[in-house]
Each structure stands twice: as C-alpha cells, then as structure tokens.
Amino acid sequence: MERDPYPLYRTLREGFPVVRDELLGAWLLSRYADVRAALVATRLGPPGPRPSPVHLRLLEPALRSSAGRTAFVLARRIAGRREADLVAEFSAWLPAAAAVAALGLPWEDATRVQEWCRTGHTQSGALHPELAALLRPHIARRRAHPGADLLSVLCGARVDGQALSDATVTGLAGTLLTGGGEATALALASFLANLLDHPAQLNLVRARPGLIPGAWAESLRRDPPAPVVLRRATAPMTLGGTTLPAGAVLACLVGSAGRDPFRFADPDRYDIFRADPVDPAGPEAPAHLAFGAGQHLCPVSPLAGLVAECGLRALLDAMPGLRWAPGFRPAPRGLMARAPRLLLVRPS
C-alpha cells in the first residue's frame, strides 16, 4: 500500500465508494464528488485564525523575493556536481529556508522551524507553541528597531488605519512558516519528479515559464502530498447515498479523488495542458483537492505555489541539462504523507 495505493483506490471507487474501515475507525471516501463534499462541509476542530486577502498580499512580495534568492543559492550549490539528490539538497530545504529568510530570522533557526512545521498548525488551529515563543522576542525587537525584513514590514503595517496586533503579526508569520512545512516540501518533490519523468513537458515549461502554475496544479492533482485527510462530521451527512452520523470520522482519500475517471479524463497521466471541467465553486477554484476545498481551502496554498515556481525557475536556470541520473527512477511512498524521498539527477 505505501508503495502503490492506486489499485486499492480504484477498487474502492468502483465498488465501495463509501465504506466503513473498522481498523481505522473511519468511513473511507474515494470518489471525487464525495471527497470534495466532505472537505467543503467539515473541518477538524474549531476554526483557527485565517489570514485575510489583505494580509496575504503583505506576505507574497517578500516571500517571492526570498524564495527566488534562496532557490538560486541552493541550485547553484549543486549545479556543478556530477550527481545530486534534489530532495536532500533542495526541496526539503527551500520552503522553510525561504520563509525564515523573508522574515529576517537567524539562519540557524531554519532547522528548528523546518522540524516544527512538519505538522504545521495544531488541530485547534493554533500555532505550534515553540514557534510562537520563538517569534515573540523577534517581534518585540522589530517594534523597537524596524529593519527591511518582512517581520518589520508586518510590525509597521496598518490595515484600515489600524496597526497589526502582536497576535496578528505572530499569526501571519506563522502562516508563512507553516507554508514552508512538510506538505510544501513533499509537493515540490513530486512536482520535480513529474516534470523529470516527462522531459518534453519539462522543456515546454523551460521555454514558457507561464505554464508553471498549471504544471504545479496538475502535479497536486495527480500526486497530492497528503493522500488521506481525516475529518469529523459535525452533523449527519449523506455521501454517495450513505447517511453518516454526526461525529463520524471521515477518511477523505484525496489521492483517490484526484484520479477519479468520472472527474478527470485519463487520470493517471501527467499533463500540464489538462483541460477538465471547472470546479463547482467556479473557474478560479482549483480542481485538485490537495490543499482542501471551498471555505476550508488552506490559506497557504498560493504561498506554496509561489515557492514551487521560484524553485523550478532557479533549477532550470542553473541546470539547463537537468535530467535523471542513469538508471534512477523515483519511488514515491507513504500513505498519510506521500512523495519520493530520493531524486537523483545529473545537473548537467
């Protein structure tokens, strides 16, 4: 299962789209329509703090600049080698390191932040307590002596004439850092693997960088970093013709939903030009479910895409001949968190 869950997903979609798994203690949902409905309707725990679009616009320019610089440094370090592992030396580091650099935190904090952000927010929506404690003294110093980093910008920002509170600044910085968590790193590894597996599409993206967002979305559909997402029904729900009681645990098989042939044509194929029906929420909503759906779409989703775009651009600029090492094939694994753990490449 950890190596190839897709035959089981196919069996579930075709014959048991909503079924109780006694060992897991949850109802398995495997079809796109049911998984999306569950993600839209439910969440784990009470709502946590969510940045507004105005707040996100404060984060994006600084993160883009920082991610571009960080990706450039990481890519140049491996560009001259005969062989390199893009997971250990690039994708595992870029998201957290870019966020730490954007906020102006000490570089030595990157390792600690990377570890804390493997779980992102807690189930209650609060920041990891150690992460919040790390940020507090930095915020106090920026209030007294602002600099040019993003944390200083947040401390000095005003929205509707009001300065941001320490709690809001902490939440926004935490949002940026959790955007550098494990999910983004895993998704970036799968993204690179999908493009390296399809050299013709990689060459198109190299020639036309405007295709990168579509290539990223297609990778999230085909290989989401969290193939199984647990939710709890807060009220009775009817999914796939089955009525589930309030309190039922739902295992939303996002990895199965993204390859549902009733929603996506030839779903196992990676295709950066995929033209599928728009999401029920409208043409601006992503068809993939890798970062949730509807009102529960993860707020760091656009930030993760920004980091992925900067990372790919840096790799392609530094390594025009980037390709797999001879004889290497990526082997994604994992049930709850899935991606290749090794990406051996020839940089030139």
Image: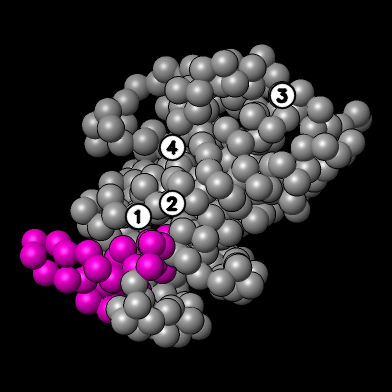
Residue drawn at point x = 38 percent, y = 62 percent: 148
Disc 3 from disc 2: Cα separation: 25 Å
Q: Disc 4 versus disc 2: distance between alpha carbons?
A: 24 Å
* Label 1 sits on residue: 59
Is there CB contact under 8 Å for labels 3 and 2? no
Could you say whether the residue bearing mark 4 is in a helix, strand or loop? loop
The disc at residue 320 is 3
**Residue depicted at 42% across the width and 79% down the height:** 138
From the viewer's perspective, is residue 223 above or below residue 167? Answer: above
> Between residues 348 and 194, which one lies in front from this camera angle?
348
The residues tagged by marks 4 and 1 sit, at their Cα atoms, a distance apart of 24 Å
Q: For the residue marked with disc 1, what is the amino acid? A: Leu
Looking at the image, tell me whether mark 1 or mark 3 is earlier in sequence order. 1
Question: What residue is pinned by disc 2?
Answer: 63
Name the mark nearer the viewer: 4 or 2: 2
Q: Quadrant of residue 5?
A: top right
Kindly report which numbered mark, 4 or 1, lies closer to the viewer in this rendering. Answer: 1
**Spatial separation of the CA atoms under disc 1 and disc 3:** 31 Å
| Sequence-first tag of 4 and 2 | 2
Q: Is residue 25 visible?
A: no
Circle 2 sits in a helix, a strand or a loop, which is it? helix
Residue located beneath label 4 in the image: 288
**Residue contact between numbered discs 2 and 1, judged by CB atoms under 8 Å:** yes
Which SS does the magenta portion mostly show? Answer: helix
Please state the extent of the stretch shown in magenta in the rendering: 147-176
Tell me which numbered mark, 4 or 3, is placed earlier along the sequence: 4
